[in-house]
Image: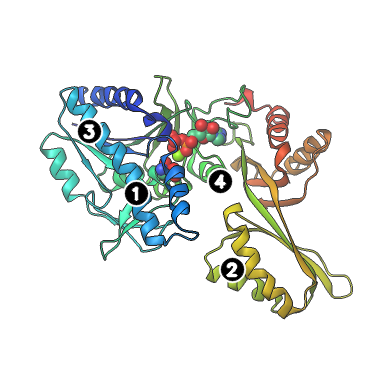
Amino acid sequence: MALIVQKYGGSSVADGELIKSVARRVAKAKDEGNQVIVVVSAMGDTTDELIKLAHQVSEQPGERELDVLLSTGEVISSTLLAMALENLGYEAVSLSGAQAGIQTDSSYSRARIRRVDPKRVVNELNKGNIVIIAGFQGVTADMDVTTLGRGGSDTTAVALAVALNARMCQIYTDVEGVYAADPRLVPEAGKLKEVGYEEMLELASYGVKVMHPRAVELAELYNIPILVASSFSDSPGTIICKEASMEVRNKVRGIAHDTNVAKITVVGVPDHPGIAAAIFEPLTRASISVDTIVQNASVENITDLTFTVARDDLVKAMSIVEPVIKSIGAKRCVADSTLAKVSIVGTGMQNTPGYAAKMFRTLFKEGINIQLITTSEIRITCIISEDRVKDATQALHRAFELEKFA
Ligand code: ADP
Ligand code: ASP
Ligand code: MG
C-alpha cells in the first residue's frame, strides 16, 4: 500500500462546494488503495483577513498571538475537509500542526521545522483514517504555536512526505503546473513537464509563488519528487525533481516576477571602512532581510548606496536607517515602493554569454527602464517599475521563445 501526501492550496478549498470537490479527489486516492495524508491551506483569503482583523484591534499585534490567530485558518479548512470526507462515508481525522508532530524553532511568523514526530499520524493511518493536517503551522518545544511564513503549507506537505518516507509529494493548486511564466500575465506561457530543484528554487525565491521556496529546498535535500497539478482538472502537471537532460533544452527555463519590492537609497555616503556594516547590522538585528545591494564607485570619497527590502518591511527599515544616516554623516535616504523584480532563470545559462545582453535589449525595446541589476550563476534579475511588469514578462517570454521549450 503506497503512502500519498497531497496538499490543497487556499483557492482549492475556498468554499464549501470546493471542499466537497477536494474530498471527492482525496476519496479517489484512498479508493485506489493508498494511505492518504492531506495538508490544507486556509480557505481563500482567510489568512489576509485574519491579519487585517488583528490590525483592527492593535497597531502592532504581538507575534505570539498573531501566529495562534493565523494558524486557525488552516485548522478550519482541515476540520471541514474531514467532515466532507465523513459525509462521503470515509473515515477521516483532522490534526493541527502541533498534533501532527510538526516541531519548529520559535521564530514566530517564519518558524523553521526542526523535526517531525510522525507517531500520531502513523497511528491514525494504521487505523485506516485519511489524515487531514492543517498546513503552515507547528509548535515550539514550549508548546507555543508558530507559523512557517506565507505560502508555508507547501513546506508542511514536503516535511511530512520526508518524515513518512512517501515516494512523492503532490501539490494541488489553481493552475495546471509550473509554467515558463505566470500564466496570469502570459496566457500563452508554456507548461513545463519537468523542472529541476535548483531552477525551481531560484524561480520560487524570485516570485514564482506556486511553490514555497523552502518546500523546494527540503525536497531537494531529501530527493523527494514534487508533482504540481490542478485541483480542478486531471491534466498531468509538472514534476519537480533532479534534472536529467539539461544540455538539450532551452537555457532559459522560466521567468519570475515579484512585486513585493521596495528600494532604499542612502545618498551622500562617506566612503570609508565600516559604513556598510553600520547600515546593515541594525537591519539584520531587526530580522529585515535585504536583497539587492548596489554601491557606486565613489567620486571624491562620497558614494550612494541602494538596497531593496520587502514592501512590508519598508517603514521599519526606514526607521532603522534614518538615525544611522546621521551618525555616519550621509546626506539623506530616499524610499521607493513602486518597483518590481523580473528575472530569467536557467541552469543552462551558466558560462554562456549573451543572455544578459538579450534581456537588457528586450527591455530597452519595450521602453522599460532598468533601475538595478543582480545576477546569480543561473539567474539575471532586473528591477523595474511595477507598472511595466506585465509588458516585461511578456516580452521576455517572446524573446527567449519559451513557448517552444515547455
Ligand atoms: P495555492 O493557494 O494553491 O498555494 P498560490 O496562489 O500560492 O496557490 O500559487 C499559485 C499561483 O502561482 C497561480 O495562481 C499563479 O498565478 C502563480 N504563479 C506565478 N508564477 C507562476 C508560474 N510560473 N507557474 C505557475 N503559477 C505561477
Ligand atoms: N494560508 C497561508 C498563506 O496564505 C499559508 C499557505 O497558504 O500556504 O500564506
Ligand atoms: Mg501557495
Where, by quadrant of the figure, is residue 66 drawn?
Answer: bottom left
Q: Is residue 62 left or right of residue 1?
A: right
* Residue at mark 1: 71
Residue 58: give x, y in percent of width and height.
Answer: 46, 58
Q: Amino acid at mark 4?
A: Glu
- Density class for disc 4 (Cα within 10 Å; few <14, some 14-19, many ≥20) is many
Q: Amino acid at mark 2?
A: Leu
Q: Which mark is residue 265?
A: none
User: What is the C-alpha distance between the residues marked 2 and 3?
Assistant: 43 Å
Q: Nearer the viewer, mark 1 or mark 4?
A: 1
Q: Is residue 134 left or right of residue 31?
A: right
Where, by quadrant of the figure, is residue 166 drawn?
Answer: top left
Q: Which of the two discs, 1 and 3, labels the residue nearer the N terminus?
A: 1
Q: Which of the two discs, 2 and 3, labels the residue nearer the N terminus?
A: 3
Q: Which mark is residue 202?
A: 4
- Density class for disc 3 (Cα within 10 Å; few <14, some 14-19, many ≥20) is many
* Residue at mark 3: 82
Q: Is residue 356 left or right of residue 129?
A: right
Secondary structure category for the residue under label 3: helix
